Amino acid sequence: MLKWDDFFRATDLPALNDQLIRLREKEPDWFSIRNHGDYEKWRQALQAIHDLVPPSPAITTDFSNDSLRIGRAGDIPEANRQRLRALLMNFHPWRKGPFEFFGIPIDTEWRSDWKWKRLLPHISPLKDRLVLDIGSGNGYFSWRMQAAGARAVLAVDPMLLYTMQFQLVASYARQPRVLQLPLPFEALDRRRPVFDTVFSLGVLYHRRSPMDHLLDIRNVLRPDGELVLETLVIEGKRGMVFVPPGRYARMRNVWFIPAPLTLTEWLNRCGFTDIRVAGLNVTSTEEQRRTAWMTYESLADFLDRNDPSKTVEGHPRPQRALLIARRA
């Protein structure tokens, strides 16, 4: 299913490809009903979509705009449009995006294009860089990185559903320079400094040991390589860290939420330099919300109805910081 050889040729880095070859042997375990009970449903939906619109060089894609476009409305007969929409719904929930499949817009939970626009002016140009996208979700940002000129993008996310969404896009994109694995970052050999840029967007607060996460990122970056880090923060002085006493915005696995200056100090102690806070953003219910393509609870359900400056647990409303740093 994964186009390993094409990616190996695109990266042409023995230090990276050697470890990927070892991971390649485990692919049958990832794409199987043993890994996830819904895998067969997703596989059949993917095949049915290909039956409706066979992948071919005639299908064009465009990943340079806010909504990633796969094909055009004219690529599929009007009579098949409702069938295609129903098949795409087999991959619910759609969280990162937006996308457009053959003229059908997918209004995802997150307006990920807003985040991309916020970070793009602050990062080093991606042209010819080897990029690692940690916690990539369905690969929305990975495709934007490729469109921005990245030499190659390796994406990792442990949720198999998101990799199946990625595979759907990849089957039409025919782009060998982007590869997503249904694995956590920790499954990679984190002792090889091969990447020019590492993105960790919305991951750090899910780590029981955030310092280890930052050290692991430092160790996979080449000297002078760049970290693009986005994570939850709280207002406060240097040294302040909020440890939720239970759930945070109904999320179970939020461990540490530092103040921006605390996070800067963490990065400094983990071997990063030229650290800057490039932006602070309070997440809005326009950027993260329930849609027809993500019908579960979303941000509006996680906030106090009487005081939206707080979560339902009474904690400060989610605020995110974007930090840029360089491996010293």
Image: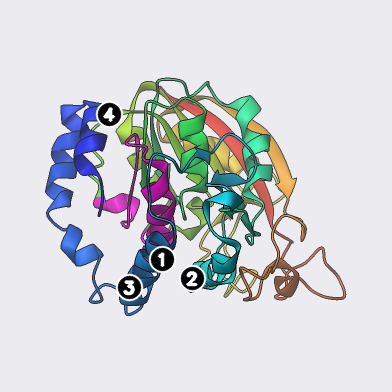
The local crowd at label 4, few if under 14, some if 14 to 19, many if 20 or more residues have their Cα within 10 Å, is some
Looking at the image, which residue is at 57% across and 71% down? Answer: 251
Q: Amino acid at mark 2?
A: Leu
Q: Amino acid at mark 3?
A: Tyr
Q: CA distance from mark 2 to mark 3?
A: 14 Å
The quarter of the rendered structure image containing the C terminus is: top left
Q: CA distance from mark 1 to mark 3?
A: 8 Å
Residue 8 seen in render: yes
Looking at the image, which residue is at 19% across and 58% down? Answer: 27
For the rendered model, the colour scheme is rainbow
Between 215 and 97, the residue placed more toward the observer is 97
**Is residue 162 in the magenta section?**
yes
Q: CA distance from mark 2 to mark 4?
A: 32 Å
* Label 2 vs 3, first from the N-terminus: 3
Toward the right, the furthest residue is: 306
Which mark lies nearer to you, 2 or 3?
2
Residue 159 seen in render: no
The residue singled out by tag 2 in the image is: 87
The residue singled out by tag 4 in the image is: 10
Report the span colored magenta.
Answer: 158-187
Task: Say which element carries label 4.
Answer: helix
The residue singled out by tag 1 in the image is: 161
The quadrant where residue 289 appears: bottom right
Asked whether the beta carbons under mark 2 and mark 3 sit within 8 Å of each other, the answer is no
Residue 262 pos. (x, y %): 58, 42
The local crowd at label 3, few if under 14, some if 14 to 19, many if 20 or more residues have their Cα within 10 Å, is some
Residue 224 pos. (x, y %): 40, 19
Asked whether the beta carbons under mark 2 and mark 1 sit within 8 Å of each other, the answer is no
Task: Say which element carries label 1.
Answer: helix
The residue singled out by tag 3 in the image is: 39
In this rendering, the answer to whether 96 lies above or below 45 is above
